[in-house]
Amino acid sequence: MGGRGLFDLENHFAFYGAYHSNPVNIFIHTLFVWPILFTSLVLLYFTPSLLNFPAGVYHGFLFNFGFVFTVIYALYYVGLDKKAGSLAALLCVLCWVGASVLASRLGFSLAWKVVLAAQLFCWTGQFIGHGVFEKRAPALLDNLVQAFLMAPFFVLLEVLQTAFGYEPYPGFHANVTEKIEANIKEWQEEKQKKQS
């Protein structure tokens, strides 16, 4: 099963999973991926609004790039898988709402410092996860767009699968595991060729 191309959840999940097979690295990503998305939305709050609202309608929510990214992520996740995607879409919207509230309260001069500190902390954690535990470069070095777009959904699916045994469809986990193992084996063989 699985779709084609952009909405082929099995292949996307297997690609991302091949770079995140170590349990400690997966745990680190589970902790840090959504905060990276959240703090990115805090910063995107300060991009110009794409629509002008009449006075009194504003309430601190701007239809800016943060909103556009939230809609793109939310719709994409629903397109990948209706159930888990709807949960991911809800989390994206909640992140946008929370980020908008926080950003409007902090103001730009404080917000960018908070975002910088949080992003440095989260990214450092993830690079340690890859360097120390996974011993493989992050997925974003091979496919930047896919890594950024899939990361939040990947960690959510990991949590749903681990905690509740959730699968988008029967056989999904087995198919993905097989593809991940094949990808890791291929990577290890290439690595050995380069070393010899």
Image (cartoon, rainbow, N blue to C red):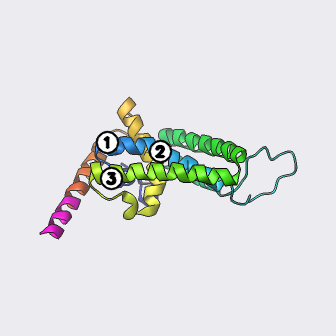
- Residue under the point 33% across and 45% down: 25
* Horizontal side of residue 51 vs 134, given as left or right: right
What is the CA distance from the residue labelled 3 to the residue labelled 2? Answer: 27 Å
Residue at the farthest right position: 55
Name the foreground residue: 10 vs 65: 65
Name the residue that disc number 1 marks: 24
User: The magenta stretch spans which residues?
Assistant: 187-196
Label 2 SS: loop
Q: Earlier in the sequence, mark 3 or mark 1?
A: 1
Majority secondary structure of magenta residues: helix
* Magenta-drawn stretch contains 188: yes
Residue 165: x, y in percent? 36, 32
Is label 3 or label 2 in front? 3
Q: Residue 74: in sight, yes or no?
A: no
Q: Is residue 98 above or below residue 146?
A: above
Q: Nearer the viewer, residue 73 or 118?
A: 118
2 or 1: tag closer to the N-terminus: 1
Q: Amino acid at mark 2?
A: Asp
As rendered, which of 101 and 115 lies closer to the eye? 115
